Amino acid sequence: MQFAVTGKQPNSKMCFVCGLENSFGLKSRFYVLENEDLLALFSPAKEHQGYPGRLHGGIAAAILDETIGRAVMMKYSDNIWGVTVDFSMRLKKPIPLNGQIRVVSRITKDTRKMFEGSGEILLDDGTAAITATGKYLKMDINTITDTDFVEEAWEVVEDRDEPKKVDL
């Protein structure tokens, strides 16, 4: 199915997953979809491989955990973040390094202090190569860290070739 992109979430400078200036990072971008899923896109580098030509399982866990944890920002605000309490994933198929990786997540249960979510890394044909679930505390970012978000460049960064619609 095809879904319209309705919003974009911020990036930072040095986060491993979303940091645009982290030379070892994924430089992922996060998009809100009309069906209330969150889409992450990134293009892995050769430094992100485990077996030759395949995405490392730890990298897959990092992007899935980040994408599920960010889903809460769609519902509340950029100031409420998900802090991982429990996370598990199931590897079904290897993920090749050639090309853009699509990760999709959503909230599956929401309570006053916590939320649960699920997510998948999708192959080009739309099948889920890896599935994951997690439980997260809802926390205000100002209680998690005292970082300077202006200095860290926590902002929405517009790109020329951003997707308007995506096939999932």
Image (tube, rainbow, N blue to C red):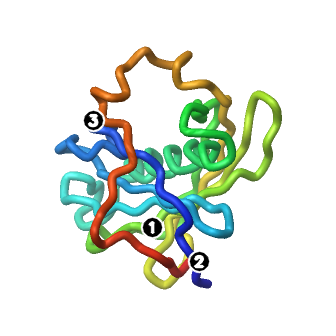
> In front: 123, or 167?
167
Amino acid marked by disc 3: Met
Q: Determine whether the residue tagged by mark 2 lies in a helix, strand or loop.
A: strand
Query: Real-space Cα distance between discs 1 and 2?
Result: 13 Å
| Residue at image point 37% right, 45% down | 11
Q: Determine whether the residue tagged by mark 3 lies in a helix, strand or loop.
A: loop
| Residue at image point 52% right, 19% down | 142
Could you tell which of marks 2 and 3 lies nearer the N-terminus? 2
Please say if 148 is above or below 102. above
Query: Between tags 2 and 3, which lies in front?
Result: 2
| Residue at image point 52% right, 81% down | 167
Please say if 160 is above or below 117. below
**Which mark identifies residue 14?**
3
Q: Which residue is mark 1?
A: 102
Q: Is residue 48 something one can see in this rendering?
A: yes
Is residue 94 toward the left or the right of residue 34 in the image? Answer: left
Query: Real-space Cα distance between discs 2 and 3?
Result: 30 Å
Please say if 165 is above or below 150. below
Give residue 14's position: percent from left, percent from top: 27, 35
Is residue 81 toward the left or the right of residue 41 in the image? Answer: right
Q: Which residue is mark 2?
A: 3
Q: Quadrant of the C terminus?
A: bottom right
Is residue 118 toward the left or the right of residue 4 in the image? Answer: right
Amino acid marked by disc 1: Arg
Amino acid marked by disc 2: Phe
Q: Is residue 17 something one can see in this rendering?
A: no
Query: Between tags 3 and 1, which lies in front?
Result: 3
| Residue at image point 33% right, 52% down | 157
